[in-house]
Amino acid sequence: MIVKAISKKKPFMFGFLLDYFTKEQDTSPETYNILAPPEALPQIKQEYLKNYFQYSKKRKNAVVCSHEIISPHPKDAREVTAEKLYDLAREYMRLRAPNALGFFQVHLKADGEERPHAHLLISGNEIGSSKQISLRKKEYQKVKQTLKRYTREKYPELKHAFVFQKDHQLKKEFLNEQSKRKHQEKQISIRMKKPTRTQELKETLEQGFNIAKTQKEFDQFLEKQGLVKYKRGKHHGIIDSKGKKYRLKTLGLDETYKIKQKEFIIYETRQAELEKTRELQRELARELAMEQTLEPDEFEEWLFYKEHAQNL
């Protein structure tokens, strides 16, 4: 398991994180020390805000809340269920901040892959108190050891314990495991002389960049390939037909897409200007044709009307 803590210092993060945790999720959330029902997000948000504004000491750079994540080690992912994660979240909350407000939401997928993990929102101060939720190094170490022991005793099938944010060696092992999977995929593709899914997508998008002259044409090209664009924050990406997400940055096409977007705008602007010019030419041609077919008296009348049309 990986336990990661991210401190937040702005009150608007209560609502932002609650929305992020619960958006399009199949699992039901759980609460800790919160009076409102788990699904009543507006009331839950108000409880967090009330506890902060009425009781917390307003200090510069003070922690308003903490976003913490419990995620299985890749080798244990198949053994982890939503029920186990909620149980571990409750136990972690009891050890970490028993007198704080807590909200838990389990996500079963990450980037389109089966990767269950739990998000926790912990208030920065205790309920009805100005006391900050803060643990010293030795106290946090004790929390870690107790949680590891609890996990091993209750869930022996989870053999790879916990990785905490400051456990650099174990965290490195987790990241190496991800790199190892990517390396294995690459080696298999080399042996079979078949490109990886990442390589296929990159080649497909590069083909689209070469064919499309406008953003609409590029979007139509993606649709024919069974691909959909998405944007998360500043990052652009692609979702394939299986629902798996790929960031353009990961594909090495982030900068290429930014340049192509500018080219789309330039081309579309030029086309609009060209269309205006063509319309003007067509109008002049119609006027010339009319001049040539009118009798002298009719021409004078038409010319007078044309010059004074705006004032009539």
Image: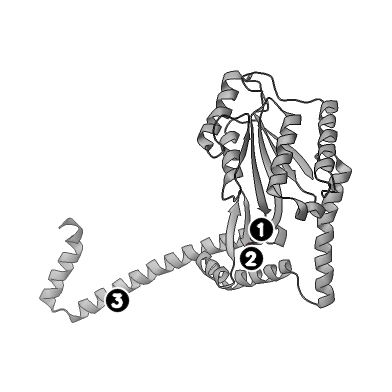
Mark nearest the camera among 1 and 3 is 1
The residue beneath circle 2 is 242
**Quarter of the rendering containing residue 299:** bottom left
Q: Nearer the viewer, residue 64 or 71?
A: 71
Answer whether residue 142 is visible to the viewer in this image: yes
The residue beneath circle 1 is 112
Q: Is residue 62 left or right of residue 304?
A: right
In this view, which residue lies farthest toward the bottom? 293
Alpha carbon separation for disc pair 1 and 2: 8 Å
In this view, which residue lies farthest toward the right? 169
Q: Position of residue 247 (x, y in %)?
A: 67, 58
Helix, strand or loop status at disc 3: helix
Helix, strand or loop status at disc 2: loop
What span is colored magenta in the figure?
A: 241-245
- Dot 3 crowding, Cα within 10 Å, few <14, some 14–19, many 20+: few
Q: Amino acid at mark 1?
A: Gly
| Comes first in the chain, label 3 or label 2 | 2
